[in-house]
Amino acid sequence: MTPILELHTPRLRLRQWRDADLEPFAAMCADPQVMRYFPQPLSRLQSAALIGRVRGHFNEYGFGLWALEHRASGAFLGLTGLLNVSFDAAFTPAVEIGWRLAREHWGLGYASEAAYACLACAFGQMALDEVVAFTAEPNVPSQKVMLAVGMQRDPHGDFDHPQLAEGHALRRHWLYRARRAQWSGI
């Protein structure tokens, strides 16, 4: 597949990562509020390693988690994109959609706008039949984004995340699906 280097919306640019993104990305990933539905905030080194893994995914598959930028100001907002699910579950192999935005950019519709562009790419340019999303059960903000972009909850697919220990407060995850044949965005 030809690599998909950028996507655009009226307000946003989903682009390849730059070295200058590390500082705002690390600050975002160190914010306990941003990371409240993840096992823990990330150190600067862990954030750098995550960017490295994202770049590797792009190199291998031609798509991944894009750096999210405001088109008018050039401000780094976070990340949004598509990636192969990295663990075994009843619904894998699968491509998932994900996002993470810095707190100062919450509530402005950026996550939904970027996620919608990713789904349009997945079902159009990539010709995928399905994209999944999942999040910890208490993560209502992400669940709202999933619904806003036309995904449907699959309660039969809910699962205990295999990378979180038994008894971890975030282990139970809800599964959402979007299928090209039913998605109204393309």
Image (cartoon, helix red, strand yellow):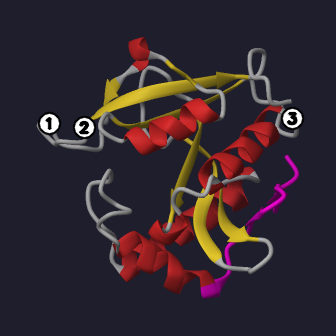
Instruction: Kindly identify the residue that appears in the image at 54 percent across and 70 percent down.
Output: 51
Alpha carbon distance from label 1 to label 2: 7 Å
- Labels 3 & 1 near each other (Cβ < 8 A): no
- Of mark 3 and mark 1, the one earlier in the sequence is 3
Of the numbered discs 3 and 2, the one sitting upstream in the chain is: 3
Secondary structure at numbered mark 2? loop
**Where is residue 166 shown, x and y percent of the image?**
14, 36
Q: Which residue is mark 1?
A: 166
Q: Is residue 46 above or below residue 95?
A: below
Toward the left, the furthest residue is 167
Label total for image: 3
- The location of residue 56, given as percent across then percent down, is 62, 63
Task: Give the labeled residue for mark 3.
Answer: 124
Instruction: Depth check: give the residue in front, 180 or 62.
Output: 180
* Amino acid bearing label 1: Glu
Q: Position of residue 23 (x, y in %)?
A: 51, 86
- Residue 49 located left or right of residue 171: right
Using the rendered view, name the quadrant where residue 72 is placed.
bottom right
| SS assignment at label 3 | loop
| Secondary structure mostly seen in the magenta stretch | loop
